[in-house]
Amino acid sequence: MKKRLFTGTKNGFSSIWAGKKNHSLLKKTGDELKKAYVERNEKDLEPVVNLYDTWADAPDDVLRGMVDGYCTPEESERVVHPQNSKDYLLRLRAVYIADHTRTWRVFLHLRRIFGKEWSLEKYFSSDAYDAFRSMLGKEEYKKCKDVACGNIYDNNANGLIFASPHGILSTYSVSLRYFSIYANLALGGFEQEVPWHVRLNSMRIACRVMLNTEAQDFIFDPRGIIPEKIMNDLKTEWWLNNIFLAGHEFSHFILGHIKEENKEEMGFLKPHFKDDTDYRKIYGYTVSQKQEFEADLAALNLVDLTDEEYSVYYCAALNWFAILAVYEGVEDSISPPNGFNQTHPGAIARYTNLIEKARRPKDFDEKIYVETLPELVSFWRDIMINDAAEHIEMYEMYGSAYLDKPNTAWRGKELIDRVDY
Ligand SMILES: [Zn+2]
């Protein structure tokens, strides 16, 4: 287990470096000293590092002291002593922030900006889940009305359903929003021109978000300037994607996929470093690939929409799998899929499933979605796979990528970490 520096040093070890002249070690020489030093190291090295892998394991008063920085007093109490699944979701959000210094800084800033209006819970959102629920029939609504849900900072950019000590929860990663925005800026057709190098950089950002190497501080360090008109289109696209993702998770409930016997331990809230032992374990539910396809179809079929609304929603779902397919090309080329990212079938298979089995809207343009878009995806996959092969360190290095160089139309002035934000 990797551990994080948390509290001071244990008596003894630090005194070696404090230069205590009469320290017993300093009187020894040669092999004697070496032996004593090694023994001392073995005995004392461990206590200089954190006693907890995560703040979730810290004693109540220590955790409260930490989360007080970005929670209201009522929220801190709910985080420390969760009574229900909503409290538990708030606790997961708060602990993630405590465990990730950069995200923690972002939230300290946010609290300062919002002042008295600040609430950690209100900062997060369950809007897409609520929107999907509100469009369901009575019976379906009943099945998922009590599920606590919302977005969360989570390095595993995905949607999830899992069991908590207080009931079932569904979450999706905040990262998915940024993935949608930057990937769609790359692939989207906009009236306004988006230069090729900006599109390429945008897709790089999107892939880095999914690979968990892009810093989660977009609020303070926007990766460039996206013209308002384009940004509005991108936000609308994400909103539709978001409802579809929420719908997919709820559909697992509605269709009866979430069963006690399908419960299994899985990794959650993965830290930056890639080490499986550092996953926090939660109980998720194993869902078959067939059920994944069914949940995608149900996310489209269960909602009550006019044909015109359905058309927009359906096409956005296809676009979602199109951008995801580009990313998966990069992901598979960098590291072949392992157990954790095989929870869902591939994006191309899910796209095909929607094309073949979902209800098609009246105005559906078959040529665009059956020919043009798949060709565009394949073009982009080739570009990005080559890019990852040529600039692998750029994809693997933790930090921030940008749409363009400083002092250009798509970037603006360079913002300096710890000076401008
Ligand atoms: Zn699923």
Image (cartoon, rainbow, N blue to C red):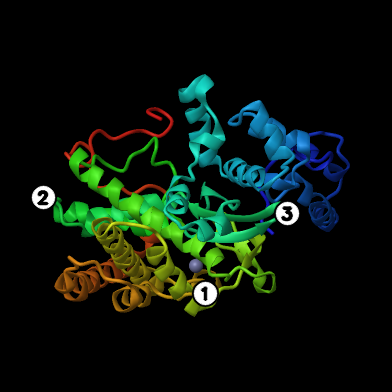
Tell me what residue is drawn at x 41 percent, y 30 percent.
421
State the residue position of label 1. Answer: 338
Question: Measured from the top left, where is residue 55 in percent x and y?
Answer: 68, 44
- For the residue pair 75 and 314, the one nearer the viewer reads as 314
Callout count: 3
The nearer-to-camera label among 3 and 1 is 3
| Residue bearing mark 2 | 191
Q: Quadrant of the N terminus?
A: bottom right
Residue 254 higher or lower than 112, as above or below: below
Q: Is residue 195 above or below residue 264?
A: above
Q: Which residue is mark 3?
A: 165
Question: What's the residue at 65%, 70% (across, down)?
Answer: 259
How far across and how far down the image is residue 162, in percent? Answer: 62, 60
Tell me which label, 3 or 1, sits earlier in the chain: 3
Q: Report if the CB atoms under discs 3 and 1 are less than 8 Å apart.
A: no
Instruction: Kindly identify which numbered label has been placed on residue 42.
Output: none
Of the residues shown, which amino acid type is indicated by label 2?
Answer: Glu
Q: In whole angstroms, how far apart are the C-alphas of marks 2 and 3? A: 50 Å
**Left/right of residue 133 with respect to residue 358 in the rendered view:** right
In front of the other: 77 or 52: 77
Mark 3, secondary structure of its residue? loop
Amino acid tagged 1: Asn
The picture places residue 216, in percent across and down from the top left corner, at 45, 45
The reply to whether residue 309 is visible in this rendering is: yes
Q: Earlier in the sequence, mark 2 or mark 3?
A: 3
- Name the residue nearer the viewer: 309 or 46: 309
